[in-house]
Image (cartoon, rainbow, N blue to C red):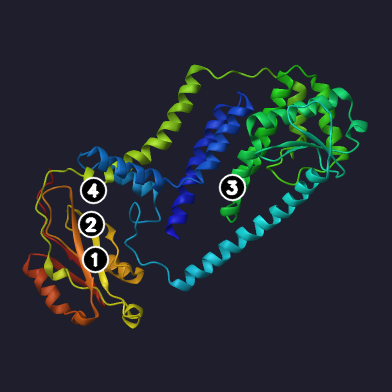
């Protein structure tokens, strides 16, 4: 669950940044803003942990070594507020029934939305297959359909222009030409492809309102971009505006976003923009540099985080890592694992903080059983202690073995407290089995 929440948080943050950028480019062409919104949409399909993983691979290949960076810790704290580590969580996972309930609910929504869209796609596909070929001059094949669906570009790989029967009775030749020019713009811009990708985003994250709001922004900007292209081609604004109004009057809108038509929801503002026919401001050098810089930051920050998080990159000066063995006890055997006779060994990679506590834990080698992995991860993270370090942090590995033949002895609380006190630690019982352990003041890190 935390992985999904982190991904939505990261994607929403990118969406907010891009939203601010579009304000900065409001006097430029709509194609610029559409490209920015498209980038925000694609971010929902690209989790940051993929870039982070590539950064870790780069660190191993290039043998990068540098001291731990506080900025990397900050990146994880801000970028993954719902998880404890960059990939693995040192926390108990939700119970299996909770996961099943969530997945069933999620998948049910996805299936319902895809089924609804698929039914509409079958309607368009049938209209294309039954439509008759037309000799109307256009940069794509033209078919005349008996449906009352507005003129639109149908298809992604081999798109065709689907025109409703009798459209030439409602539109003059000049008005029809502006409609064809509009659809040709959709063809050049691959608008059906980008719309289909965002429909995938909407299907996957149907429960998340920002993806539907983003879809509306994409639709509005792509239509404005094509409006600007039609006017830039020398067509009369009055003729073009009347063609759109007639299409909206006599025909119904395209049933799918990935079948780009002519109409749009915000018709009043669109008509005003067409009739104004404003001269667009070209991108200057500063704005181009801004776009390139933002793109580089969005890609390079997670790559750099992976590069400097990788254990191979943590080349800090060696310092002594000495565990307080009294705290290194075997975790309780999960009852369900014992019943299923699950055994195995879990290898954990740990980051030990300056004060001797585990700051991060991740699974380096699984036991093959998720219950045993979670039990080891949770127990080590919550109970294991090390002597205070002379450096800022250090990496170490811990192997936890689960063997039904060597079940752990009952936990001796008094002995555990006494061993810690003998090492100079202050142990205060907070109530029940909860203790606050204060280790001796460590030497200054360097």
Neighbor class of circle 2 (other Cα within 10 Å; few <14, some 14-19, many 20+) is many
- Counting residues from the N terminus, which is met first, the one under dot 3 or under dot 4? 3
Q: Is residue 407 above or below residue 149?
A: below
Q: In percent of the image, x 50 and y 69: which residue is there? A: 100
Residue 277, quarter of picture: top right
Q: CA distance from mark 1 to mark 2?
A: 9 Å
Q: Position of residue 380 (x, y in %)?
A: 24, 66
Q: Which callout, 2 or 3, points at the residue further toward the start of the chain?
A: 3
Q: CA distance from mark 4 to mark 1?
A: 19 Å
In the rendered structure, are the residues bearing label 1 and label 2 in contact, judged by CB atoms less than 8 Å apart? yes
Q: How many marks?
A: 4
Q: Secondary structure at mark 4?
A: helix
Q: Which residue is mark 2?
A: 350
Q: Is residue 435 visible?
A: no
Q: CA distance from mark 1 to mark 3?
A: 39 Å
Closer to the chain start, of discs 2 and 4, is: 4
Disc 3 versus disc 4: nearer the observer: 4
In the displayed orientation, state which residue is furthest to the left.
422
Mark 3 = which residue? 211
The residue mark sitting in front, 4 or 1, is: 4
Per the image, label 1 sits on a secondary structure element best described as helix
Q: Which mark is residue 380?
A: 1
Furthest residue in direction right, as rendered:
169
Image coords of residue 116 (percent x, y) = 70, 56
Secondary structure of the residue carrying numbered label 3: helix
Task: Tell me which residue sits at (39%, 66%) in the image.
Answer: 93
- Nearer the observer: mark 2 or 4; the answer is 4
Task: Judge left or right: residue 265 versus residue 286.
Answer: right
To which residue does mark 4 refer? 311
How far is disc 2 from disc 3 in space, using C-alphas?
37 Å
Above or below — where is 25 with respect to 163?
above
**Mark 1 or 2, nearer chain start:** 2
């Amino acid at each position: 669950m935390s992985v999904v929440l982190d991904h939505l948080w990261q994607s929403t943050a990118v969406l907010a940044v891009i939203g601010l950028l579009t304000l900065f480019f409001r006097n430029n062409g709509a194609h610029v803003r559409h490209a920015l919104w498209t980038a925000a949409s694609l971010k929902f399909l690209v989790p940051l942990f993929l870039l982070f993983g590539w950064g870790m691979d780069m660190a191993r290949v290039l043998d990068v070594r540098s001291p731990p960076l506080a900025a990397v810790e900050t990146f994880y704290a801000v970028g993954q507020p719902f998880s404890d580590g960059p990939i693995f969580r040192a926390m108990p996972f939700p119970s299996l029934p909770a996961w099943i309930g969530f997945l069933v609910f999620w998948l049910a929504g996805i299936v319902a939305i895809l089924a609804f869209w698929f039914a509409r796609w079958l309607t368009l596909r049938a209209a294309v297959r039954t439509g008759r070929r037309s000799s109307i001059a256009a940069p794509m094949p033209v078919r005349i359909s008996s449906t009352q669906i507005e003129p639109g570009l149908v298809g992604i790989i081999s798109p065709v222009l689907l025109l409703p029967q009798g459209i030439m009775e409602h539109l003059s030749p000049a008005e029809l030409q502006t409609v064809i020019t509009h659809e040709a713009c959709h063809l050049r811009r691959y608008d059906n492809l980008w719309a289909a990708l965002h429909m995938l985003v909407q299907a996957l994250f149907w429960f998340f309102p920002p993806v539907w709001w983003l879809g509306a922004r994409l639709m509005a900007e792509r239509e404005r971009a094509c409006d600007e292209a039609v006017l830039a081609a020398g067509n009369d604004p009055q003729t073009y505006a009347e063609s759109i109004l007639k299409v909206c009057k006599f025909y119904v809108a395209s049933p799918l976003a990935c079948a780009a038509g002519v109409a749009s929801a915000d018709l009043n503002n669109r008509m005003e923009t067409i009739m104004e026919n404003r001269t667009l401001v070209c991108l200057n050098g500063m704005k181009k540099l801004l776009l390139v810089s933002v793109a580089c930051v969005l890609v390079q920050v997670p790559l750099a985080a992976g590069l400097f998080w990788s254990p191979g990159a943590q080349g800090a000066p060696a310092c002594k890592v000495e565990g307080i063995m009294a705290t290194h006890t075997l975790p309780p055997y999960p009852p369900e694992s014992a019943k299923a006779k699950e055994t195995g060994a879990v290898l954990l990679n740990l980051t030990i903080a300056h004060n001797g506590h585990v700051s991060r834990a991740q699974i380096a080698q699984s036991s093959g059983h998720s219950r045993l992995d979670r039990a080891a991860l949770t127990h080590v993270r919550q109970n294991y202690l090390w002597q205070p370090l002379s450096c800022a942090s250090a990496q170490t590995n811990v192997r936890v073995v689960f063997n039904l033949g060597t079940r752990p002895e009952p936990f001796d609380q008094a002995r555990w407290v006494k061993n810690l006190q003998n090492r100079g630690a202050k142990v205060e019982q907070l109530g029940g089995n909860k203790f606050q352990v204060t280790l001796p003041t460590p030497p200054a890190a360097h």
